[in-house]
Amino acid sequence: MRVELLYAPGCSSFSRARNTLEMVIAEERLPVPIEMIEEDGQLHGFPTIRVDGAVISPKHHFDSIRDALQKRWQELTEHPLMQT
């Protein structure tokens, strides 16, 4: 599972988004790193969180991030051998 945090230089919301993402990953005990990607021109200056390419929460609410990570982790671990 690939978790990305895209942010613009000088973004004031960046640290809050990163902290929330780190708390969710730690709470769920997921063995996934966060890939930090610096990009200019982020939409409205908010950081973007992507999981395997899908944007999961434009405002970084703890519950929506947790739900998205749990769902994707479950998809990857419940039926990994069925993907052919």
Image (tube, rainbow, N blue to C red):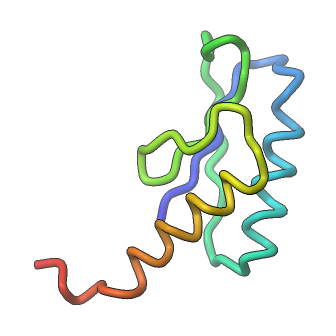
Q: Residue at x 57, y 54 (%)?
A: 3
In the rendering, at what x and y percent does residue 68 appear? 56, 58
Q: Residue at x 23, y 89 (%)?
A: 81
**Residue 75 placement, left or right of 1:** left
Residue 7 in which image quadrant: top right
In the rendering, at what x and y percent does residue 25 appear? 73, 67
Q: Residue at x 39, y 74 (%)?
A: 75
- In-front residue for pair 36/82: 82
- In-front residue for pair 68/10: 68
Number of marks present in the image shown: 0
**Which quarter of the rendering shows the C terminus?**
bottom left
In the rendering, at what x and y percent does residue 8 appear? 71, 20
Q: Can you say whether 66 is above or below 53 in the image? A: below
Question: Which residue is situated farthest in the left direction here?
Answer: 84
Q: Can you say whether 78 is above or below 58 in the image? A: below
Q: Can you say whether 27 is above or below 44 in the image? A: below
Residue 45 in which image quadrant: top right
Q: Residue at x 65, y 77 (%)?
A: 30
